[in-house]
DNA sequence: CTTTCTGCAAAGGCTTTGCAGTCCG
DNA sequence: CGGACTGCAAAGCCTTTGCAGAAAG
């Protein structure tokens, strides 16, 4: 999904957030935000930690700090988080258009989609029930194109 | 939400499921399904356990068995499950129309809604991306009518 | 009788927390 | 300098699992 044009970089926006709350700009926080926004992709804490420097290497950040910083990013509006299979998944929120996900229950791939109509339905339902909407999460569970193809292949083979 | 008319009661349907898999009808499973369907409401494991007999009382069921049986109910198509705030929430699936939820982030109330249009959007998006849909979960986060009202009241008081 | 179940307690996965030392502003 | 932050290890929370005895078919 293409980035939106925003006036501040995620880093700058995070700095602003920290300042507004009297929090400090540490090397760990800077490094993490940089890493998190270096590629647009969903991730969970484990995946993020995996691509960070190990203990003892330069720029190592402890697990605790990773979790703490991810939480701050959510508070700051940089990341969105939701639960999937018992873990927390993070997704870029700042600088990317609002979107939802298709989830392949076979290969666990997440695919983004965007639908204005979905947002309309959302707002309509909220109004109907007297809610003031903050956000929403929609996940469509199913089998992706690739897995459908593989399964078909496999079935053919099974028949031989 | 009004129940649908179904030919089998949840209990009967669960019995069928068990039989079809060579599983056994135990007093614990019967009792749990009965309890789960005695009121139409969302619940998590803890909430369910809370309203069950305690250890030592008649019909006591262990935590492990509760979790195991909830899982079986999901497999059997009696319950739907999704994650909210780090725990698993269960919802009647069998005998009730498909629906989604509004979630009040202030009082943690879940409100059901139904929208055919939402399902249409879902199918459209799945087709567009080559997915075969199994199910979906949508949660709209916001503030409910009651909490909005209370907040307004509270603000007024604050001003006095 | 055989296989599945149950309760118990212990383990597991993910995330948070308490603490002492460190660093930012 | 003082308060906020970090790393470490330990704890927490929810859920699952191994096992021995109990029960279903």
Image: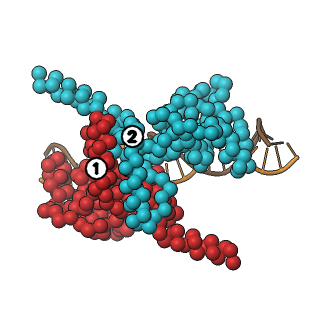
Chain colours: A cyan, B red, C brown, D orange
**Circle 2 SS class:** strand
Asked if the residue under mark 2 is in contact with the one under mark 1, i.e. CB atoms within 8 Å, the reply is no
Q: Which residue is at 55% across, 39% downward?
A: A95
**Foreground residue, B37 or B56?**
B37
For label 2, the residue is: A113
Q: Position of residue B15 (x, y in %)?
A: 17, 57
The count of marks equals 2
The subunit letter for the residue under badge 2 reads A
Q: Are marks 1 and 2 on the same chain?
A: no
**Foreground residue, A68 or A32?**
A32
For label 1, the residue is: B120
A16 lies left or right of A117:
right
Q: Which residue is at 48% across, 36% downward?
A: A43
Residues packed near mark 2 inside 10 Å, few (<14), some (14 to 19) or many (20 plus): some
Q: Is residue B124 above or below residue A127?
A: above
A31 lies left or right of A95:
right
Instruction: Tell me, yes or no, if residue B102 can be seen here.
Output: no
Q: Which residue is at 37% across, 68% downward?
A: B51
A83 lies left or right of B155:
left
**Foreground residue, A129 or B82?**
A129
């Amino acid at each position: 999904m293409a980035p939106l044009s925003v006036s501040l970089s995620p880093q700058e926006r995070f700095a602003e957030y920290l300042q507004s709350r009297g929090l400090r700009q540490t090397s760990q926080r800077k490094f993490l935000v940089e890493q998190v926004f270096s590629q647009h992709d969903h991730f969970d804490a484990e995946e993020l930690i995996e691509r960070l420097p190990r203990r003892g290497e330069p720029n190592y950040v402890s697990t605790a700090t990773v979790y703490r910083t991810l939480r701050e990013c959510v508070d700051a509006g940089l990341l969105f988080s939701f639960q999937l299979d018992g873990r927390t998944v993070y997704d870029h929120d700042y600088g990317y258009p609002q979107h939802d996900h298709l989830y392949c229950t076979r290969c666990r791939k997440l695919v983004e989609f965007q639908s204005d109509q979905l947002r309309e339905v959302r707002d309509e339902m909220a109004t109907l029930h007297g809610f003031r909407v903050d956000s929403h999460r929609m996940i469509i569970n199913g089998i992706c194109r690739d897995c459908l193809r593989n399964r078909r292949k496999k079935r053919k083979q099974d028949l031989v």
